[in-house]
Image (cartoon, rainbow, N blue to C red):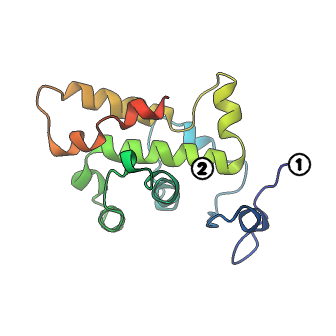
Amino acid sequence: MKLRCDRQNPACSRCQQKHLFCQYSSVPLGSHSWIYDSRLPEEPEQLLMLINGYFDRVYPLRCLGLVHRPSFIHALDQGRLVEEFGEPLVQIVCAFGAYVHALDLGSGMRTYSSGGPIPGESWATKARSAVLEEMGTPNLKTAMVGEAPRLFFH
């Protein structure tokens, strides 16, 4: 039996049962197609959900701790995320966040294993392309992304 978020406060029963940090947005369940979109979400609530998913579930893996969380959130709040961290880093953080979000919804692994699209795949692909394009002139912003796009696909 699949358990979905029942939107109970302060934590839904699914998250309580799995001992997860409970966070959900006002975006209705079932309307998560934006995690497959080629453009990053413009809604601050969606961006924050992806970023928190990355920091809560991916960042603790030592090889994927790409950036300082308070600095990243501060840049988001100031509307300067891409300017301060570069588009490839924002894309890969959101790609990992989208994948984690899909797993939390119970659809991520099923979609991936059936050969369908991977949540956040287009963002990871764009990050990888940007890093490869700038290989001749490396900079701190693209160097921080490093191997993350390759790891996303494995």
- Spot the residue most to the bottom: 10
| Residue at screen point 60% across, 28% down | 117
Mark 1 or mark 2, whichever is nearer to me: 1
Q: Is residue 81 above or below residue 129?
A: below
Point out residue 102 in the picture as x, y percentages from the top left corner.
Answer: 63, 45
Provide the secondary structure element on which disc 1 rests: loop
Neighbours of disc 2 within 10 Å: few (<14), some (14-19), many (20+): many
Mark 1 or mark 2, earlier in chain? 1
Identify which residue, 85 or 20, lies in the foreground.
Answer: 20
Q: In this view, does 139 lie above or below 153?
A: below
- Spot the residue most to the top: 115
Left-right relation of 142 to 126: left
User: Residue 9 appears in which quarter of the rendering?
Assistant: bottom right
User: Residue 134 appears in which quarter of the rendering?
Assistant: top left
Q: Which residue type does callout 2 highlight?
A: His
Measured in 3D between alpha carbons, the distance from the residue under mark 1 to the one under mark 2, in whole angstroms, is 19 Å
Left-right relation of 45 to 2: left
Point out residue 50 in the picture as x, y percentages from the top left corner.
Answer: 50, 53
Q: Which residue type does callout 1 highlight?
A: Met
| Residue at screen point 52% across, 54% down | 57
| Residue at screen point 61% across, 66% down | 21
Q: Please name the residue that numbered disc 1 is placed on.
A: 1
Q: Please name the residue that numbered disc 2 is placed on.
A: 101
How many marks on residues? 2
